[in-house]
Amino acid sequence: MKKELLLASALASTMGAAGIAEAASATFSGHTRVGVEGENPDSSDSDTVAEKQLNNFTVSISETTDAGVTIATGFSLTDEGSAESDASGLTLTFTDGSSLQLIEAGSASAAHAVSVPGGGGELGISNTSTNNSAGALTTGASSDKVGFDYATAADAFGIEGFSANVSAAFNSDVSETSGANATVTLENAYAVGVTYVTTAGDSTVTVGAGYHDATNNSQSATKDNAVYHVGATVETGDLTVGAGFMDGDWVAENNQMQGSFASVGAKYVSGDITFNVGATSGDAKDEVLGTTAASAEDSVDVIGASVDYVIASGVTGTVGYRNQDSNDEGASVAATSGSSWYVGATVSF
Amino acid sequence: MNRKLILIFLLPILSFLLTSCNETRGIDTSQLEAQTQGEIIKRSGTTFPGGTQEEHQLALADAENRLKSGGGLLGKKGLSLGEINKSEKTTATIGLPINPYLWKGSLETIDFMPLASVDPFAGIIITDWYANQGAPNERCKINIFIKGYEMKTDNLKVNSFCQSLSNGQWVDIKNNIDNDAKLENAILNKAKKIRLSQS
């Protein structure tokens, strides 16, 4: 309601004014991913097999005002190895289709990263903590949670197929730190992302790009977060192919990195079955803050494939396989290289 | 720094080049499904919150499964808590050119006052004079106008008129606009509560 209920009204209270109504509508949803994963590292002749049980439960609350603006918030309960509860801030969706995220704003850059097909499933040998290779197109696109993210409506600025986001997060009052053992905290962050979707013959072409910049509180760091990504997908009938590339500097924990990530893949949908195949390559030169940079790189190269089968609405079975090569400071690490497989199901509700 | 400068110029240039090669002119671009992570999350109807990179990836995983499998077990956007108690109860609206919730909300809000005139087709409620026992030297009457079918504040107007007793004569008091707005709010909230109870 546009007009706010003021309970202090003498006349209204005399007349037994109504209390505040239940203003918002709520929905709950979530998913559970259950399966078995096997790993066969190059350092060992014996395989390991373990269960994977990952659960999420989300409550979403929203309401639309008389003026047509939708106000949404919510929270999720997550059990993905470590229990976590997380709120979603506020999202305002306007009548023209544009939206404004507040508090949990995230990065405008990440929303415009293309979704490159690749092998799915909850699989993969965990890397050592000293391997700081870039692992996604959105690597380095981190920010403090106090901020906003504005998304334009479709066909922004009168350009058909064009949309954009701009975001900013503010955290400038953090105490400065120095030295190799001090964990870095991000301060102010700014990001922009753009998407352009068009057609080429019978194909739909999506091009996405973004840039993210963030400062930090470490006096020892010689790098701030400055990462960009660009990518494209082409969808022709049931076949989708895509490629993406990310490059830049970023900080995490007490390290600063300079690296890149590339991803290519394809998927083919045949009825209820989806075939996925993809390859990724990530690298980084990592340095502990305040120390001299090493010349050797960390890297992780992955090739994977999977088959998804839609069992019912919201239920998908997945069989996946992945092979990875991991290098730390230029040297191959057998314990984190090797193959893995996964058989499981995702149930969304 | 050089990389930043290059990028700052690169993004607009890239956008310009793509726009120049725009093949979508004359095509309904709303039918095109962009394959960016943000659009996939938006299109799927997932309610998973974004924010951090981990949350973003989680929302993307849920979104891809929903798009692949046609939604979730409980529908595309999960289960609305309001639907649990959903019944066939409806408000009679046949013949009424005004919002039925605002109408019922108005009547319930002022149900302690005597009514002088009521016209549901014109959306007019006029009360008789009413004096509170706590203030017998003051009386008020209220005119309520419901002006349309949509449940919005613009379709509701309340005017109150009050008088005070002075030397045995009822004398008009200056209209209090704040009280009118507070009454409108009370009616709007009552109407909303009725709507929610019947949805």
Image: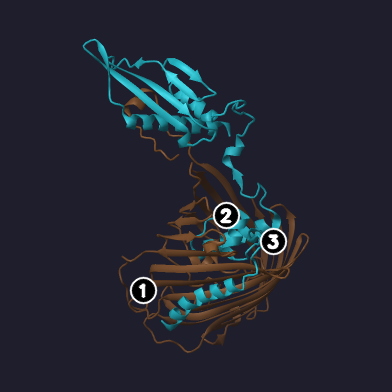
Chain colours: A brown, B cyan
Residue B186 seen in render: no
Q: Which three-letter amino acid code belongs to the residue tagged 3?
A: Gly
Say which residue label 3 marks: A344
Q: Which three-letter amino acid code belongs to the residue tagged 1?
A: Ala
In the rendered structure, the residue with mark 2 lies on which chain? A
The spot of residue A54 in percent (x, y) is 60, 58
- Distance, label 3 to label 2, CA atoms, is 16 Å
How many residues crowd mark 2 within 10 Å: few (<14), some (14–19), many (20+)? Answer: many
Rendered residue at 50%/88% (across/down): A296
Q: Nearer the viewer, residue B188 or A245?
A: B188
Label 1: which secondary element:
loop
Rendered residue at 52%/61% (across/down): B55
Residue A4: image quadrant is top left
The spot of residue A246 in percent (x, y) is 54, 76
- The numbered disc on residue A348 is none
The spot of residue B54 in percent (x, y) is 52, 64
Q: Is residue B126 left or right of residue B25?
A: left
Q: Nearer the viewer, residue B90 or A259?
A: B90
Residue farthest toward the top in the current orientation of the protein: B168
Rendered residue at 27%/22% (across/down): B173
- The numbered disc on residue A56 is 2
The spot of residue B32 in percent (x, y) is 66, 62
Residue farthest toward the bottom in the current orientation of the protein: A295
Question: Closer to the N terminus: mark 1 or mark 3?
Answer: 1
Say which residue label 1 marks: A182
In the rendered structure, the residue with mark 3 lies on which chain? A
